[in-house]
Amino acid sequence: MYIHDKTKYDFVKVLEDNWETILEEYRSVADDVIPWPEKELNPEENWKVYPIYDWPSGDVSTNYAEKVPFTASLIKKHVPTHGAAGFSRLPANNFIPPHEGFNGEFLRVHLGLIIPEGDLGFKVVEEFFTWEEGKCQVFDDRPRHYAWNSTDGDRVILMLDFVP
């Protein structure tokens, strides 16, 4: 099983309860997103991120985190075993190709912030989910996975790694 029961993690409720404030902070920095750094996954640099905590260490991305203090402090306070965290924007009609995640003892959380209607989703091995605004998904990022957004709108999530 690669998609996990989110109710096992208390911080998920905190994220979901505060998703609208997290979304407001994303909107305040939406123009400051940068291309996902792995060129093989993002050759046209369409997939953009806003790093709050660096990968894989979880060290604060000072120049970024200070612009989203609510989100940064929420993660620090409620997810003490967090690693990398940040906003991820996959634009309309884009695809993140199949790949394997970093080999480590962590899981990944996606909190839906802006989720357009239509054909979009995430597949890890043979398990699938789509995002919902204000809702989290918890999954194992290590096996082969990919995401797509075949809609006319951008998909925005808060992405967060943590050690269970």
Image (cartoon, grey):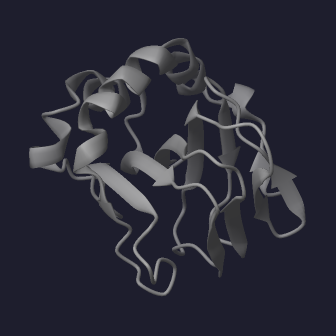
- Residue farthest toward the front in the current orientation of the protein: 152
Q: Residue furthest right?
A: 126
In the displayed structure image, the side of residue 61 where residue 33 appears, left or right: right
Quadrant location of the N terminus?
bottom right
Q: Residue at x 78, y 36 (%)?
A: 5
Indicate the quadrant where residue 149 lies: bottom right
Residue 11 located left or right of residue 68? right
Front residue of 159/2: it is 159
Q: Position of residue 38 (x, y in %)?
A: 41, 79
Residue 57 to residue 18: above or below? below
**Image coords of residue 96 (percent x, y):** 61, 71
Q: Which residue occupies 71% across, 70% down?
A: 145
Nearest the camera: 90 or 104?
90
Is residue 41 found left or right of 80 in the rendered image? right
At x 26%, y 45%, the residue is 31
Query: Which residue is outermost to the left?
Result: 63
Q: Quadrant of residue 28?
A: top left
As drawn, 152 above or below 111: below
Camera-side residue of 112 and 31: 31
Quarter of the image that includes the C terminus = top right
Look at the picture and state if 128 lies above or below 44: above
From the top left corner, tell me how far across and down residue 94 is, in percent.
Answer: 61, 65
* Residue at screen point 46% across, 64% down: 47
Instruction: Give coordinates of residue 40: x percent, y percent.
Output: 49, 87
Residue closer to the observer: 126 or 164: 126
Above or below, 50 relative to 131: below
